[in-house]
Image (cartoon, rainbow, N blue to C red):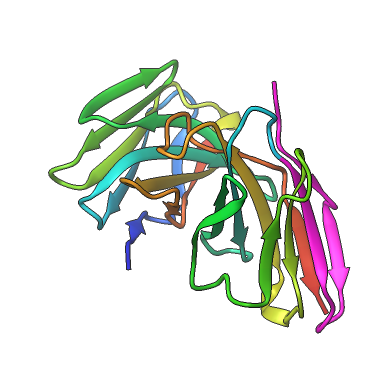
Amino acid sequence: QKEVEQNSGPLSVPEGAIASLNCTYSDRGSQSFFWYRQYSGKSPELIMSIYSNGDKEDGRFTAQLNKASQYVSLLIRDSQPSDSATYLCAVMDGGYQKVTFGIGTKLQVIP
Amino acid sequence: EPEVTQTPSHQVTQMGQEVILRCVPISNHLYFYWYRQILGQKVEFLVSFYNNEISEKSEIFDDQFSVERPDGSNFTLKIRSTKLEDSAMYFCASSQTGTGTYGYTFGSGTRLTVV
């Protein structure tokens, strides 16, 4: 059974701080990695994708991938109250059209 | 911005009844998916669909489930005889590629309540 593990939180950070969200995955064959944001009662919204080891930056978001450690993280700089949501880590196997999601980490940004 | 459209947004059905959930994927996308999320739980893969056939399905997707692309735009999920445990949010998604490039675009979901 391929697993994607996240701490469900909540993770509370003050407005303007850096939020750090972490994820580990079990399948070494995984090729594509995603972070989705999900507001309560809404559908997941893609915010970052990463495929190679290292960092990928997009605005206030930085995704980090370490395939040797089977670890993916998301940093959110200058956190805003509107960033308060559940962040889902998702992993796709190489050669498969199936994405496995983690339980998600609930982020609370305190004004 | 192109979007995936799902109808209805909320459906209540009696146990044992059949339901059809409808989706209109983004027009130039070739890969289609159904996921579900039981309240408070993970988003779970049900099925992927490409070139008018199922390409992969999960253990959840048993004989009570079926998918169809009846025309060039719609993609449907049928649950033949609903059970209480089928109550969940059902998400349709589509993507341009099957390799994960660009990720999925999800629809807004159908909340299915089986009573």
Q: In the orientation shown, which residue stands out farthest toward the left?
A: A68
* Quadrant of the rendering where the C terminus of chain B is positioned: bottom right
* Quadrant of the rendering where the N terminus of chain B is positioned: top right
**In the image, A78: left or right of B27?**
left
Residue A60 in view of the camera:
yes
Q: Nearer the viewer, residue A69 or B69?
A: B69
Q: Quadrant of residue A64?
A: top left
Residue A70's spot in the image, x, y percent?
A: 21, 47
Q: Quadrant of residue B27?
A: top right
The residue depicted at 28 percent of the width and 51 percent of the height is A24
Q: Nearer the viewer, residue B15 or A103?
A: B15
Looking at the image, residue B66 lies above or below residue B55: below
* Count of numbered circles in the view: 0
Looking at the image, residue A57 lies above or below residue A63: above
The residue depicted at 42 percent of the width and 37 percent of the height is B100
Q: Nearer the viewer, residue B10 or B33?
A: B33
Q: Which residues are magenta?
A: B1-24
Looking at the image, residue A12 lies above or below residue B22: above
Residue A104's spot in the image, x, y percent?
A: 46, 52
Residue A111 in view of the camera:
no
The residue depicted at 67 percent of the width and 78 percent of the height is B85
Residue B28's spot in the image, x, y percent?
A: 64, 27
Q: Is residue B60 magenta?
A: no
**In the image, B2: left or right of A19?**
right
**In the image, B55: left or right of A50?**
right
Q: Is residue B2 magenta?
A: yes
Q: Nearer the viewer, residue B112 or A37?
A: B112
The residue depicted at 71 percent of the width and 56 percent of the height is B68
Residue B46's spot in the image, x, y percent?
A: 56, 62
